[in-house]
Image (cartoon, coloured by chain):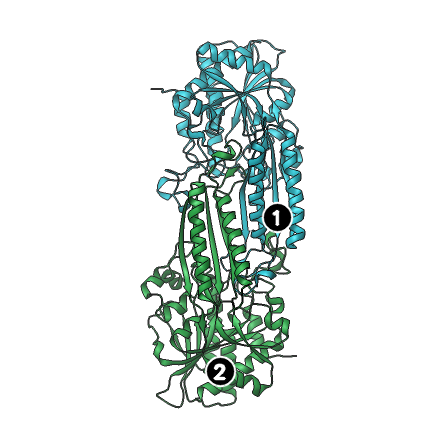
Chain colours: A cyan, B green
Amino acid sequence: MINSRLKADLIHVSQYGRNPVHKVSEYHQLTPYNGVNRVTGSLANKEIRDYAIDCLKECGLKLTIDPFGNIFGRKEGTEKNKGSVMSGSHLDSVINGGQFDGTLGVFGAIEAIRRLNKENFQNKRPLEVAIFTGEEGSAFGKTLLGSSAYIGYTEAEEALQIKNKQAISLKDTLKNIGYQGKIRKNVEDIDYFIELHIEQGPVLYQEKIPIGIVESINGILWIYITIKGKSNHAGTTPMNMRKDALLAASGIVQFINSESVKLSKTPGSATVGTVGQLNVSPNAINTIPGIVELGIDIRDKKIENINLTKEKLLKMIGQLKDGLKLKIDYNIATFLPPQPLSQEVMEIIRESAQTIGVKYKFMNSGATHDAQNMARITKTGMIFLPSVNGISHSPLEWTNWDDIEKGARVLTNTLKLLSNK
Amino acid sequence: MINSRLKADLIHVSQYGRNPVHKVSEYHQLTPYNGVNRVTGSLANKEIRDYAIDCLKECGLKLTIDPFGNIFGRKEGTEKNKGSVMSGSHLDSVINGGQFDGTLGVFGAIEAIRRLNKENFQNKRPLEVAIFTGEEGSAFGKTLLGSSAYIGYTEAEEALQIKNKQAISLKDTLKNIGYQGKIRKNVEDIDYFIELHIEQGPVLYQEKIPIGIVESINGILWIYITIKGKSNHAGTTPMNMRKDALLAASGIVQFINSESVKLSKTPGSATVGTVGQLNVSPNAINTIPGIVELGIDIRDKKIENINLTKEKLLKMIGQLKDGLKLKIDYNIATFLPPQPLSQEVMEIIRESAQTIGVKYKFMNSGATHDAQNMARITKTGMIFLPSVNGISHSPLEWTNWDDIEKGARVLTNTLKLLSNK
């Protein structure tokens, strides 16, 4: 039985934004219990931040909150002129999400500092914990919002003005929950970044390997498409006089799937393509859909594949538009190229896993992470833990406690080794 | 210029439930102004009922409200033992609907009584105005709710317990707006029913004919389908390990369309098939859709065609279920067979049109109407007026004022002739 403080923290924070079991709606009948809802700016998002702040203070870390709501806790090192070793992740969730996505990396980093404090470890380099705002993009339609603004990939003003579904800006959202800081943190002070995260895919679980060492993070493209047809009475409008936006959208859903299946079978690729979001208006059984909005997610290890699917999609949209006399607009909300991680950090993680005596595997990350942004500015590594049945972004997301303990040990050792470099 | 009281009434009531122009959301950009929102039980639905009640009282009619919220106004006739002539329609609307759908038939019937009163016409049979609850089914997912309960086609208790999207029963909804009456009205007292309505299709407008005499109302089938796949991370779940509910749903959208197009080209049919409603859960761009709900509307003049599409759809669902390892449930919410109308009433409407000197055309109704239910219990007719560009269930729904005046005259004359039979 593992009874670490990390386990206690993860169990405690899994209640923030969780719908009570007895309120399970029809939409969630497939799950044994409800997921967590902690999109950026929600009450639950504030509550979990408050709890994390308490933990950072308890560890004796010095706090900074930047204008994008990113939270940093810092422990100075014994040597003055060296850059810091930073570790962290995010506390926001998707809608009806799982309890370990993001929280593991934040409370894992806090646990590592706690363990190092306990053994009176003297770190040469400063050690830092990072909590990034809006990794999921469920509130603001843009993934990695906080880390993008932090590294300057998104302009500060642009990031702060982006609006959520209630048309409230990131700036106001953060102000409302008391998390808009004043001082921007200098990215040049950081020499290493490590993120502990659940794999969110099936590889480690199927192969019964507790530790994944990430070599590269897949590139990601998010396209939102709006199709404008003509809303009309379903009973009286002859089939040949319709401009059905949902009919056009259904073609896009099938196209994205078939293209992705095809590409995923080519050697060296790791293609996935999904239409996860689709809104119909007016959405009445007896009315031909006038407007449909789709959200498309395309990812790959190879940038050529992402570009190929994008070009084919835009060509297909052009044909649909002309064929069905519809108006179709699109908007690329996110594009991150595939990102290789630091060879040096990978070796340190491997050394840590070997020291502790746990099996590991070098692998690719299908999901996007804040580490993808951090890798643009500093030497970055990621440690993956197995997701039971490969499930994530779902209330059924789970990682076993003994794997979490192994991950905490590998992370603690990695921070130890890096802080002495 | 036509400046009838009917025109004034229709302009007045078109404001109930109308979103202000300056609040046009992105979803409604294709329309020059917003539609009306008067689903059963809404504040706007109460307000338009209140106004209609005032008009009925002004005409000296005796009011009855039944347990289903149906409103009746009655003017006794000079002969005691004859059944009444009833005319009316509904005041609820679809979401973002048009301003004449239903209101024309209610305020048209009121106008006819007003004109007959003005000329001191002595009706032998009683004359009645009917306002039926929940014709559209936008609130309760079931079309013709009030008239079905009135004629006993739906059991009283079942109708009152049916719940809207906020899980409030019809009974409570009606109580909340003060429209649940106590006394059920006897269907056997009625000898004739006439409904004035916009065509909601393109035929009369294209052929420049002001009056349609309906011979038959298409049969209608509403099926709701729930597809349960598996919600999972869009970036990490390989294409061959997915159970994507939206992918399955997109196949159903295309199937309904292609089958309906095919059948609509066969002689003697008037097939239309639409997926107007589609809800995705959790509906996040980076999550594979776990659950999709679809609402399907199938209509035809021939019952064989409706049954054929239904059977093919259920077969297709079975194959999808097995092929993609999904769980698919369906529920038939509405089924009304095609309904021929009364030959006797058609002749009276034709005579009225001839007397007034307007062109007319015998035709089929693609839309469902309360008249479809009334035709099961009494001799029933319908008068159609042209819909500009065939548009309905949309803010762009329009009928020209001179056509409305012609309709009012034909209806008044028809009631006059029938009440003397």
**In the rendered view of the protein, which quadrant contains the N terminus of chain B?**
bottom right
Residue B231 % position (x, y)? 46, 38
Residue B341 % position (x, y)? 45, 76
Which residue sits at x=50%, y=54%?
A: B277
Q: Chain of mark 2?
A: B
**In the rendered view of the protein, which quadrant contains the C terminus of chain B?**
bottom left
Q: Label 2 is placed on what type of residue?
A: Ile
In front: A316, or A211? A316
Q: Is residue B271 left or right of residue B333?
A: right
Which residue sits at x=49%, y=26%?
A: A199
Q: Is residue A336 left or right of residue B166?
A: right
Q: Which residue is mark 2?
A: B113
Mark 1 secondary-structure assignment:
strand
Residue B314 % position (x, y)? 42, 53
Q: Which residue is mark 1?
A: A226
Q: Residues within 10 Å of mark 1 (few under 14, many from 20)?
A: many
| Residue B247 can be seen in this image | yes
Q: Chain of mark 1?
A: A
Question: Label 1 vs label 2: CA separation?
Answer: 48 Å
Residue B46 % position (x, y)? 46, 66
State which mark lies toward you, 1 or 2: 1
Q: Is residue B312 left or right of residue A344?
A: left
